[in-house]
Amino acid sequence: MVNLDLTLARKINNRKLSSATWTSTTQHKFICPAGKRWFVLYGMISRDVSSTITVRVYDSSDAQILNLEEATAATGSSVWPNLSGLNEVDGGAYPIILDAGEYVSIGFGTAQSTVAWITCVVLEVDI
């Protein structure tokens, strides 16, 4: 019997479990690497300082593609995107497909301490 390894995709749990590992204490970019394509599935955010949050998708030239989530100031954990009510993905298809250099940006209105954390779960394929 011939063993054909046809693994074409893998689930990636992008986790930043401390704001000290983010791009800054108010923002982080999860960037699709070269030679890959991401199918963005979902993520979680935990705020320890009351703050608004935004989750947006940008292309490689930093132009916004769409808004995945906006939330009012609060603390605690939340899942994005919120697929019910007023916070629906901007009427677009889901999951969101990103090419190399495109990214998910998670932004906070107020700086978070090192106990805040964020995740972005994707299905990654080689291209």
Image (tube, grey):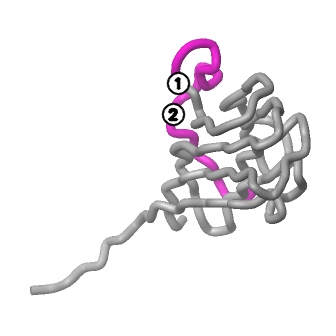
Callout 1, which amino acid? Leu
Q: Nearer the viewer, residue 108 or 9?
A: 108
Bounds of the magenta segment? 84-101
> Magenta stretch: dominant SS?
loop
Q: Is 118 on the left-hand or right-hand side of 52?
A: left
**Whole-percent x, y for residue 116 in the image:** 74, 51
Residue at image location 51% in from the left, 44% down from the top: 41
Quarter of the rendering occupied by the C terminus:
bottom right
* Mark 2 or 1, closer to the camera: 1
Q: Nearer the viewer, residue 10 or 80?
A: 80
Q: Residue furthest top?
A: 86
Q: Is residue 8 above or below residue 97?
A: below
Q: Which mark is residue 83?
A: 1
| 10 Å crowding of disc 2: few (<14), some (14-19), many (20+) | few
Residue at image location 81% in from the left, 58% down from the top: 114
Alpha-carbon span between mark 2 and mark 1:
10 Å
Q: Is residue 100 within the magenta segment?
A: yes
Q: Which mark is residue 94?
A: 2
Asked which secondary structure carries label 1, the reply is loop
Callout 2, which amino acid? Tyr
**Whole-percent x, y for residue 112 in the image:** 85, 47
Residue at image location 71% in from the left, 29% down from the top: 67
Tell me the quarter of the picture where residue 115 sits: bottom right
**Whole-percent x, y for residue 9 in the image:** 43, 63
